[in-house]
Image (cartoon, rainbow, N blue to C red):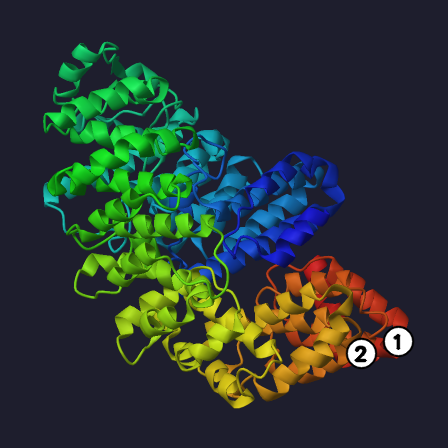
Amino acid sequence: MADFKALARSELVLQGKDVRPFLREGAMLATLQPHLTGIVDDVQQLLLDALGLFSEIGDASEQFDRAHWDLPSISDHHQNRHFHDWTVLIELLRDAWLEMKKADPALAQRRAADWWSKPYPVFKRLALFAAGEGGVSAEQWVEWLVSDRAWWLWSLETHREVLRLLVLQGNTLTARSRNRFERAAMAGSPQDMFSSDKEPSHWEELEDGMVWLRLAKFASSGAALSQRGSRRLAALAKKWPDLQLEEDFSDEFTHWMSGTGDPGFESQMRSERAPRELDQLLVWLQIETSKDPFVTDDWSTVCREDFSLAMKALNNLASQKIWPIRRWRQALQVWSDDVFRVRSWQGASTLLTKMPATTLKEVAPSASWWFGAVSQSVVNQDQRLWRLADRFLSLEYEDGGGTDRAVGSALNHPVGQVTQGLLSHWFGSKPVDDQGLPGGLRKLFTKLLDATPVSLKHGRIFLATNVIALFRVDRAWCTNYVLPLFEWKRSNEQALAAWEGFLWSPRLYLPLFEAFKTDFLDTANHYQALGEYGRQYASILVYTALDVSGTFTKDELGAATAALPVAGLKTSAQALVNSIDGAGDKREEHWKNRIEPYWRAIWPKANELVSPLIADPLARLAIAAGEEFPDALRLIRPWLVSLRNADHCVRTLAGASLCRPYPETALELLSAIVSDQPFLPQELGNCLSEIGVAMPKLKSDPRYIRLADYLKKRQS
């Protein structure tokens, strides 16, 4: 149980850390059945928090979230590639629910119904998964599918889970429920659900195909369609004879990835063997490669298993001014591995400095990645590193890098990758404070600050990311060249990119903060523009304010904090919780010496900012204050309002064992945050019981009576 609590408290997922090791706990869930409700509640709250953060940047709403892209199937499936660590929360929630179903089917059914009532489509998917596992009555899940204009029957968000449900549970429907489903399926999707910019004939085919798929999946469960449903299915099959169910169930997914190791993939592939003799290989490398995606060859294997042969062949062709682009890309990708870095640098770096600029530009995505990998292995005095880097930086690239955010673009751009390589090479030399940048590196970094070539902005991102190191080692150069990037008055676009770069992995270094104090404080006025990095800014603004060195005045910090929107203040409040949790057994001292002065002098006092978003972490902040709980609640009480999901706070209060020593304070907190809840944990009853034991007269308090009556009503 401890690891789940740590996961919930530390918010590893929300900080972008790798939480996949927690999947190991899935195998232990069966042994934790007494704690399953708490586990589900903890993980569910984290998932809600994560989705709430996505919603702040437009990546989630009541009808859309990114989950069906990041985790295509709620049930275990090879299409779940686990590219995104946050999806571990969904899988933990699924696995814990399955164990809950074994231990208490009625509780599991109530949980599934609670999921359906929550915002964000991923909870609809979890509820439909639960229905597919037999955890929801047939009448209930049919009601889900036909309600709200049958929106979720047709939504792309729930496509996989709806079709899986029809296959697994279609044959359990009564005639009445079957007819309700058929009517909704044959009526087609809501008119405003999908874009209608396609040709009418094409749209007709798509709409008919969607209707056919749902009826066919239902029939594949062994369920008997009504006469009307059977006639409609047969008519659609006759009208569109190519319609058929896929054997690999790929028709249940809105997108399908196929690659090595996937079922049926290998049988589609045809591989050609590259010659192992130099003369034959030289001829073979000049033959244009097949564009058929299912035709491959083993040139990459040659590069890996016979490095000398591959390098000799490419060197021979280069001497003839022949540069097979795809073969160079493949070779450099292989040689980015640790075992080839030193050898490939010796051979490939010289050739790349001679490669024609037009060719180098075409291989740049692979070559710059290779450069970033091998640069750590290059000795300090090798001038080829500077020359090759200069070549990459001098190329004319098309602007862009695959994402709207500056850091994402830089990570995928050759200039960004080369800059990262140069920084890695520099860090490998273990620079010390005030040492100064090496001449060659300083020249290249100064070149990046030339605003004329647009593509160089991708390198400036990583100078901003590493501004603390640059400032410590070469303060004069950094002050003159890098810190101006952060100035909003010069260029909003450039400053936004620089702050995104810094906030990608921010650290508190007060001498630097003193140097760009004005622009750091002004960044609060650009919170919305920062998108996901706004949360990082709000957090580090709190840690800056909790510092007592005097770098910033209270008025300066108060003005910046007051400029944050509600979403930023929510993150600030959570940062306060994290800071007091990090104080461990000194939490009371941390409250009195750091957080209470911060609250009185810096936290904004505007009533219009009060919001459930902020109330939730502030309630947990008061609880985290330990023995200072009464004082903490008095201070934050004006910010507390009823929470839609107060279960996490209630469990936190119960776990902190504060109800018995501070019964009046605990009752005040519960009364403030608990009202109409979709799901209440059993810990509310425990809290009320401890309050009543500690101070019996509180049982006649109207707040206590309301909560006790409400709990009794919900449990009946």
Quadrant of the rendered image containing residue 319: top left
* Residue at 45% over, 43% down: 142
Q: Which residue is mark 2?
A: 664
Above-or-below relation of 159 to 614: above
Above-or-below relation of 549 to 444: below
* Residue at 36% over, 24% down: 260
Amino acid tagged 1: Met
**Mark 2 to mark 1: distance in Å?**
8 Å
* Residue at 48% over, 30% down: 168
As drawn, the label of residue 132 is none
Q: Is any atom of residue 150 visible in this view?
A: no
- Foreground residue among 393 and 429: 429
> In the structure shown, which secondary structural element does the residue marked by tag 2 occupy?
helix
Specify the farthest residue to the front: 381
x and y, in percent, of residue 441 in the image: 33, 56
> In the structure shown, which secondary structural element does the residue marked by tag 1 occupy?
loop
Q: Going by the image, does 427 lie left or right of 550?
A: left
Quadrant of the rendered image containing residue 99: top right
- Foreground residue among 389 and 80: 389
Q: How many marks?
A: 2
Q: Which residue is mark 1?
A: 695
Above-or-below relation of 434 to 232: below
Q: Is any atom of residue 624 visible in this view?
A: yes
Amino acid tagged 2: Glu
Evaluate if marks 2 and 1 touch, with contact meaning CB atoms under 8 Å apart.
Answer: yes
Image quadrant occupied by the C terminus = bottom right
Above-or-below relation of 349 to 466: above
Q: Going by the image, does 188 lie left or right of 686?
A: left
